[in-house]
Image (cartoon, rainbow, N blue to C red):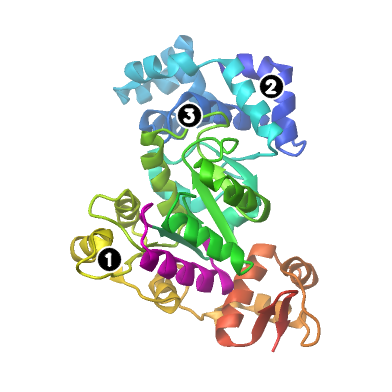
Amino acid sequence: MIDALLADESTCAVARRIRGGQSEGLADVVARAAWSVIAEPGDAVAGVLTQEFGAVGGLRYAFDASARTKPEVRRAGAVRALAEARRRWAPRASPAAVCRAFRAAESVGAHLVVPGDACWPVRLSDLGTQAPAALWVRGRCELLVAQPQVAVVGARAATGYGDRVASELAGDLATTGAVIVSGGAYGIDGAAHRAALGVGGETVAVLAGGVDRLYPAGHHDLLTRIAERGAVVSEPPCGAAPTKWRFLARNRLIAALGHATVVVEAGWRSGSLNTAGHAATLGRPLGAVPGPVTSASSAGCHRLLREYDATCVTSAAEVRELMGESVGAPPGVSSLGPDRSRVEAAMSTAVSLTIADIAERAGVEAGRARAILGLLDLEGTVRRDERGWRRR
């Protein structure tokens, strides 16, 4: 499988183009793309093989019988489900399918981000054997590692109360430098994304299907805007349909990416509780917004407060307090060291500058500059207008 892919110059050529012309580590990149095509998101058997032998070696072990006879790999024979997994993977184990995924990604300008890249979110390693092999991204890959990130999720059938609270929370958090992560769905997800974009902030939408199939259809324009100004991310490759089980698997990525997860509104059996469960399992701070005790739309949030030991949050300030242990107690500007001084020195009280301009002048990464500006804004040292940022 992997040898056939690496011998296919057409596949390797498009893989290099998607990677910006880079040939370094191409075998690992192609292998990880292949795993995203072959295995369903969260496939633990694929995860064990990748962890044990690497992406390339794992493919050889799975599909090359001779590789499984070598003494140095026999210790992985404890993977009892391998035979069943190989039967499960066989229909997709085609070099042509991997090449189609690469070409579809290239057609929409998508990138492939893999572990070891500067834009790879290391928090995903907390998922263990269920960590994704790679991520397909449309938009700004650097947002995957920007800090802090807050997952804002909730019911698709949101009430006016839920929409309003989600918009206020997400807008306030985005204004102060947080990246809003959600699932691009109707209801709370959409309100959170729109609020972040509306204040000129950053947002990431994690999809259940390929990034070339913007779903739901009613959010095509919203997701297009996110792809242009933020990032649209998926674990399945381009062309993959957003099936029911992929939504559930997608939720673990939303929880893992966030430094904290906030459930704004959710029914008793809402899918948002699945995201909350992943956040709790990962040890991420979990917040829930209370609602009227008579509202079925808030029953899930009340359940989180009672059964999951979630923290009650009613404002962006309380969300920032919730994140204190994982990203530094806000406003922890004093702990930013010389980067703070460089960012402040790069700014003017008379002229507003974009984050890119400030980062270039200060000699710091754009994501780092964005986080510092958000914390400085909390402190009251800087302010933001329609042109950018300036010192007060």
Is 190 colored magenta in this rendering? no
The magenta segment: 154-180
As for residue 170 lying within the magenta part, the answer is yes
Question: Which residue, given by chain and number where applicable, does mark 2 sit on?
Answer: 11
- Which quadrant of the rendered structure holds the N terminus? top right
Answer above or below: position of 171 versus 59: below
Front one among 277 and 152: 152
Residue identifier under label 3 = 53
Residue situated in front as seen by the camera: 250 or 371: 250
Compute the Cα span from label 1 to label 2. Answer: 47 Å
Question: Residue drawn at (46%, 71%), measured in percent from left and top?
Answer: 169
Label 2 vs 3, first from the N-terminus: 2
Residue 147 in view, yes or no: no
Location of the C terminus by quadrant is bottom right
Q: What's the CA distance linking mark 3 and mark 1?
A: 38 Å
Observer-nearest of 318 and 95: 318
**For the residue marked with disc 3, what is the amino acid?**
Phe
Residue 331 image position (x, y, % from top left): 51, 81
The mark lying in front, picked from 1 and 2, is 1
Decide: few, some or many residues near mark 1? Use Cα within 10 Å; few <14, some 14-19, many ≥20.
Answer: many
**Which residue lies under the disc numbered 1?**
310
The amino acid on which the numbered mark 2 sits, given as a three-letter code, is Thr
Helix, strand or loop status at disc 2: helix
